[in-house]
């Protein structure tokens, strides 16, 4: 159970460094803001119960990755730079324990700052007369939480992979551009441009390009959860493309489940493999 | 009669032909070293000799390019967690654990090692009890070092690995460090510590290994080391004038390895017991002695002695 000790320490570090409190305050304010806007308009056209979940999904779909990247990108590489990792690895912790414990600790921090924001938004909007769909709200939270877990895994993988704090910081900004800023969707076009002898691609999008775009984490999460909450995910701009009546193989929930799982497992596995095979 | 196989439990550290290269740079070259259980072993060498690399390999912070390292009878690489359960470490590079207080550091170590030490007693012993409730991130280098030493002492480890434990400590701290090493050795622990300062190693160690540019040039007892140091000690005798034939007379003294003149001075390389005789011979030759300076063998002189330079 040594990973639990590392996870607990990782969470307590966030508290002792006051990072946890800053995030609680900031995200709490965002939650209150959303609650107020939804509650304030509860008598108008925005009276439907999916308004609050939709708001939360699209605002926190943007915030959760930023929070996850910010709190995780320096978690291991930073300890490596200060010598803290030498101390931890002089105690009976394996490198595996350090990675697993840190991952769970960061997820705990993420959860601890997301839950109050969602609760504040719901309480305030309901108090102001907006309808509340608890099941849909829970689904929304689960979606945002999954987004956060995926980006925590990516950032922590990066933090484990490199020995340079600036590579970790720059890399996580790159991840932000790639998925939140959606540069991912441009990659197939770029490849087609290069393959076509530096001329702009024309004609219908080939299947591989369409499939590639559906591999982004946001899109994977959308495709996975779409059958459960279609009314919520019809308008999720962070996910690319849209889900039609009959879905192609690369939008099947099972396939999307593997995509999401891969975005969690692969970054951690690659980071850990590198960490395991290099000197401190 | 064939030699009886050495009982495995009696060897604390066993390096076999350990080589470590970083890119094209060789940090360690074919190091063979055995440290017996219960020994206080000093690992001596200038900065960059490969001391920390050796310690990194013992703790699996670095992997050897070739060769094998065993600690407490276990493979240093595949059984590193089990090794570290029974080892206390003061690493070369250490940073505080987040914003934990000193006491939280020791408590964290106690939990990790599943021990039942009293954190306050440990901090009392290493002299940081007064700062126990302050975050260690605000400690000075010397205080952090004392904290790390305290963490190393948790659970009475079978082996203590201390990388340059006295660097950054004031003379009083260095003395306390030596006392702790003695106490731990009396308890039966093996102590392996590195230093680039000869006197500190001399004061506490049973045996010493000398590492130079990645090669273990000597493993010797303190007596052996003293002998080598004696041979390379120098004395300079300043005279009003240098009499004829004095150099030859001095060279003839038992224990003098070399003699030469430098201006009005005679410089003799000699063992300590021969120094009186050098002065006596000089006076007998009719010269007036104006000044005598003696110098202890420096670490560099020792290397010269062991690598055949003297």
Image (cartoon, coloured by chain):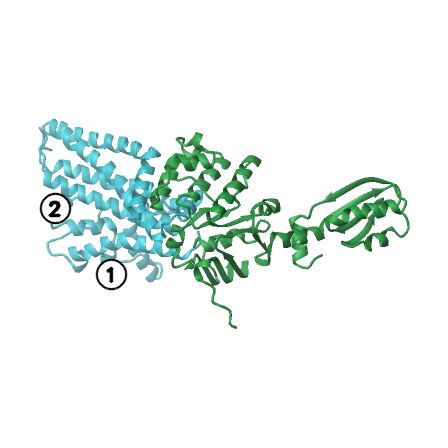
Q: Position of residue A102 (x, y in %)?
A: 32, 46
The structure residue drawn at horizontal position 31% and vertical position 52%, both measured from the top left corner, is A268
Observer-nearest of B99 and B33: B33
Q: Position of residue B228 (x, y in %)?
A: 67, 54
Q: Callout 2: 10 Å neighbours few (<14), some, many (20+)?
A: some
**Residue ID for mark 2:** A229
Q: Are the residues under marks 1 and 2 on the same chain? A: yes
Chain of the residue that carries numbered disc 2 in the rendered image = A
Q: Position of residue A58 (x, y in %)?
A: 20, 40
Q: Is residue B46 visible?
A: yes
Q: Colour of chain A?
A: cyan
The structure residue drawn at horizontal position 31% and vertical position 35%, both measured from the top left corner, is A15
**Residue ID for mark 1:** A208
Q: Quadrant of residue A78?
A: top left
**Side of A7 relative to B76 (left or right):** left
Observer-nearest of B289 and A122: B289
Who's green, chain-wise?
A: B
**Side of A193 relative to A126 (left or right):** right
Q: Position of residue A232 (x, y in %)?
A: 13, 43
- Of the 4 image quadrants, the one containing the C terminus of chain B is bottom right
Q: Earlier in the sequence, mark 1 or mark 2?
A: 1
Rounded to the nearest angstrom, the CA distance separating label 1 from label 2 is 27 Å
Secondary structure of residue under mark 1: helix
Examine the rendered structure and indicate whether residue B202 appears above or below residue A117: below
């Amino acid at each position: 159970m040594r990973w639990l000790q590392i996870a607990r320490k990782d969470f307590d570090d966030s508290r002792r460094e006051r990072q946890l409190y800053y995030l609680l305050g900031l995200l709490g304010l965002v939650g209150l803001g959303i609650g107020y806007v939804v509650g304030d308009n509860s008598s108008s056209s925005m009276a439907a119960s999916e308004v609050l979940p939709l708001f939360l999904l699209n605002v926190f779909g943007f915030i959760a990755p930023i929070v996850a990247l910010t709190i995780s990108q320096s978690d291991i590489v930073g300890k490596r730079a200060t010598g803290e990792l030498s101390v931890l690895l002089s105690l009976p912790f394996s490198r595996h324990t350090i990675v697993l414990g840190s991952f769970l600790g960061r997820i705990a921090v993420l959860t601890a700052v997301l839950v109050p924001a969602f609760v504040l938004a719901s309480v305030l909007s309901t108090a102001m007369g907006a309808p509340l769909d608890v099941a849909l709200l829970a689904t929304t939270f689960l979606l945002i939480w999954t987004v956060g877990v995926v980006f925590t895994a990516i950032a922590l993988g990066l933090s484990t992979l490199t020995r340079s704090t600036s590579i970790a910081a720059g890399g996580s900004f790159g991840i932000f551009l790639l998925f939140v800023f959606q540069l991912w969707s441009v990659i197939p076009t770029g490849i087609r441009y290069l393959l076509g002898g530096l001329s702009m691609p024309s004609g219908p999008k080939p299947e591989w390009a369409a499939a590639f775009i559906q591999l982004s984490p946001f899109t994977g999460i959308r495709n996975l959860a779409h059958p459960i909450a279609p009314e919520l995910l019809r308008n999720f701009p962070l996910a690319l493309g849209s889900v039609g009546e009959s879905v192609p193989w690369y939008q099947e929930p099972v396939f999307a489940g593997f995509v999401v799982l891969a975005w969690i497992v692969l970054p951690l596995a690659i980071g850990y493999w590198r960490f395991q095979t290099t000197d401190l | 009669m064939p030699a009886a196989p050495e009982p495995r439990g009696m060897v604390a550290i066993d390096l076999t032909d350990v080589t470590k290269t970083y890119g094209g740079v060789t940090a360690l070259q074919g190091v063979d070293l055995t440290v017996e259980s219960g020994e206080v072993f000093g690992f001596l060498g200038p900065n960059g000799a490969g001391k920390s690399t050796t310690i990194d390999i013992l703790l699996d912070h670095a992997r050897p390019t070739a060769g094998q390292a065993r600690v407490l009878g276990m493979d240093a690489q595949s059984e590193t967690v089990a090794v570290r359960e029974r080892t206390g470490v003061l690493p070369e590079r250490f940073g505080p654990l987040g914003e934990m207080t000193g006491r939280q550091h020791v408590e964290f170590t106690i939990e990790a090692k599943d021990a039942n030490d009293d954190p306050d007693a440990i901090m009392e012993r290493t002299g940081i009890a007064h700062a126990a409730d302050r975050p260690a991130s605000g400690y000075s280098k010397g205080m952090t070092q004392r904290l790390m030493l305290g963490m190393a002492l948790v659970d009475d480890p079978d082996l203590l690995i201390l990388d340059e434990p006295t660097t950054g400590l004031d003379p009083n701290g260095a003395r306390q460090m030596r006392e702790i090493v003695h106490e731990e050795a009396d308890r039966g622990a093996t102590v392996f510590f590195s230093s680039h300062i000869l006197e500190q190693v001399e004061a506490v160690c049973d045996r010493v290994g000398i590492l130079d540019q990645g090669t273990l040039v000597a493993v010797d007892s303190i007596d052996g080391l003293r002998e080598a140091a004696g041979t390379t000690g120098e004395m300079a005798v300043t005279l009003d004038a240098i009499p004829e034939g004095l150099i030859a007379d001095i060279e003839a003294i038992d224990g003098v390895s070399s003699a030469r003149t430098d201006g009005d001075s005679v410089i003799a390389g000699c063992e300590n017991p021969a120094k009186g005789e050098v002065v006596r011979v000089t006076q007998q030759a009719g010269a007036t002695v104006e000044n005598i300076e003696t110098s202890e063998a420096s670490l560099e002189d020792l290397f010269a002695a062991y690598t055949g330079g003297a």
